[in-house]
Amino acid sequence: MIVYEKGHSLYLNLTNRCPVSCRFCVKVPWDYQFEGHDLRIKGPEPTAEELLDALNERLKTPGPWREAVFCGFGECVYRLGEMNAVGLYLTVHHPGLNLRLNTVGLGNLIWDRDIAPELALYLDEVAVSLNTADPKQWLDLLRPAPRYRKKGFAASRLFAELCVAAGIRTRITAVELPEVDLRPLKHYAQTIGAEFLARPALA
Ligand code: SF4
């Protein structure tokens, strides 16, 4: 399923690939199922046209939709071109929809450039899943792929700061875990002009 719904939001599931392997991730334990939706992408990842077809199918019938969210069981910024195409289309054709990205914040390392300015062309919000203010704990919790181990922690924080600077409403997020003191992360969010949200682990 490439578009699924939750509450007043339509979620876009662009990929199952991740640059990290979070300890708290339910993707594998839940066999890619989420609240009755099968989020395993079988075969090629969806094109922008396929995503827009699926979105427009939902949007053409009256519904409670207030938001479209780039968030599935994977890191959507791997599909930056498709995100840009879908996001820019939605800003023109469905200007009432709030557009959000949920990410681990490694997009600038993935693309080797600052992607915040192009995201700012269509995103209203970005939620950056940092989970801790401690670099060693970040490695332990997110278990990044080798390419991201050395620079990933700093890069994800810088990404959040660049999103704030680009004018995107930015939220630092964390999963509540007994071993993590979230107060320094909340303080960091306030320092850079971002919001902060802690959520219970899925179980
Ligand atoms: S970024 Fe999301 S989908 Fe990927 S490993 Fe972490 S929790 Fe799972």
Image: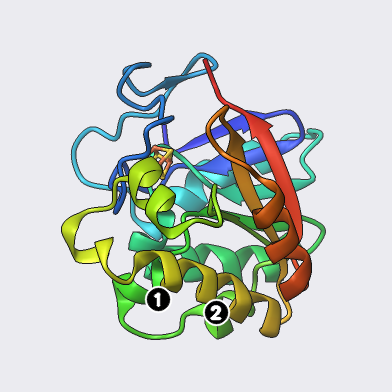
The reply, left or right, for residue 164 in relation to residue 156 is right
* x, y percent for residue 156: 47, 67
With respect to residue 14, does 91 lie above or below? Answer: below
- What amino acid is found at the position of numbered circle 2 in the picture? Ala
- What amino acid is found at the position of numbered circle 1 in the picture? Asn
* x, y percent for residue 12: 51, 45
Q: Residue 108 carries which label?
A: 1
* Residue 93 visible in rendering: no
The reply, left or right, for residue 105 in relation to residue 151 is right
Q: Does the residue labelled 1 lie within 8 Å of ligand 1?
A: no
Q: In which quarter of the image is residue 187?
A: bottom right
* x, y percent for residue 181: 62, 42
**Nearest to N terminus: mark 2 or mark 1:** 1
Q: In which quarter of the image is residue 90?
A: bottom right
With respect to residue 190, does 159 lie above or below? Answer: below
The reply, left or right, for residue 107 in relation to residue 148 is right
Q: Which residue is drawn at 54% across and 50% down?
A: 132
Q: Residue 89 carries which label?
A: none
Label 1: few (<14), some (14–19) or many (≥20) C-alpha neighbours in 10 Å: some
Nearest to the observer: residue 146 or residue 57 = 146
The local secondary structure at tag 1 comes to helix
Q: Which residue is drawn at 36% across and 27% down?
A: 27
With respect to residue 104, does 5 lie above or below? Answer: above
Q: Which residue is drawn at 33% across and 17% down?
A: 29
Q: In which quarter of the image is residue 65?
A: top right
Q: Which mark is residue 116?
A: 2
